[in-house]
Image (cartoon, helix red, strand yellow):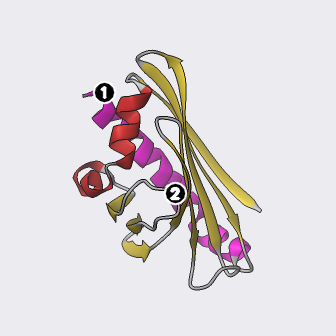
Amino acid sequence: MKELTTEIIINASAKRVWQVLTNFSAYQEWNPFIVSSSGKALKGSRLTNQMKQGDKTMTFSPKLISVEENRRLEWLGHLWIPGIFDGHHIFVIEEIAPQQVKLIQQEKFSGLLRGLIMKQAGETTQAGFIAMNRALKERAEQ
């Protein structure tokens, strides 16, 4: 398994960060990594996400596997079919103070093509996480 993890401190409440994170239809307004998303933050539901990967855009439809309001959002996505290249994406909101949180964005990659794909896209993906974290911070702190 290969894992990418990023963190950022956001000067906003956990509730505010959650609102920005789960307002999927607004992603196109602020998110430089997942440039479009649709769906509802309900466990078991599917999202339709468009992710910017370098100069390409890729559409994927992950299934939400954990939704804990103001605390945690997780989805599981697959490239083509399960077992080829799978991504378990996790957002954790840890309250530091009433108006400050640490956002952890992490993805655990597995599957037959994990090594090859991560060699090609790992750095770009990590940069995308960082860009999304910064943009989420900016929007939540407004």
Residue placed under numbered mark 2 in the picture: 43
Q: Residues within 10 Å of mark 1 (few under 14, many from 20)?
A: some
Within the image, what quadrant is residue 50 found in? Answer: bottom left
Report the residue at 73% width, 72% height from top: 115
Residue 138 shown in magenta: yes
Report the residue at 44% width, 15% height from top: 98
Residue in front for this viewpoint, 135 or 102? 102
Residue 107 lies, in percent from the top left, at 62, 55
Main secondary structure along the magenta-highlighted residues: helix
- Give the residue type at disc 2: Lys
Q: Residues within 10 Å of mark 2 (few under 14, many from 20)?
A: some
- Give the residue type at disc 1: Glu
**Of helix, strand and loop, which one carries label 1?**
helix
Lower sequence index among marks 2 and 1:
2
Q: Please indicate, yes or no, whether residue 15 appears anywhere in the rendered image.
A: yes
Disc 2 from disc 1: Cα separation = 27 Å
Tell me where the magenta segment starts and ends, as one range.
114-142
Quarter of the image that includes the C terminus: top left
Residue placed under numbered mark 1 in the picture: 141
Decide: is 50 above or below 65. below
Report the residue at 49% width, 50% height from top: 129
Within the image, what quadrant is residue 88 found in? Answer: bottom right
Decide: is 47 above or below 41. below
Left or right side of 62 for 109: right
Q: Residue furthest top?
A: 97
Residue 116 shown in magenta: yes
Residue 26 lies, in percent from the top left, at 25, 52
Left or right side of 114 for 105: left
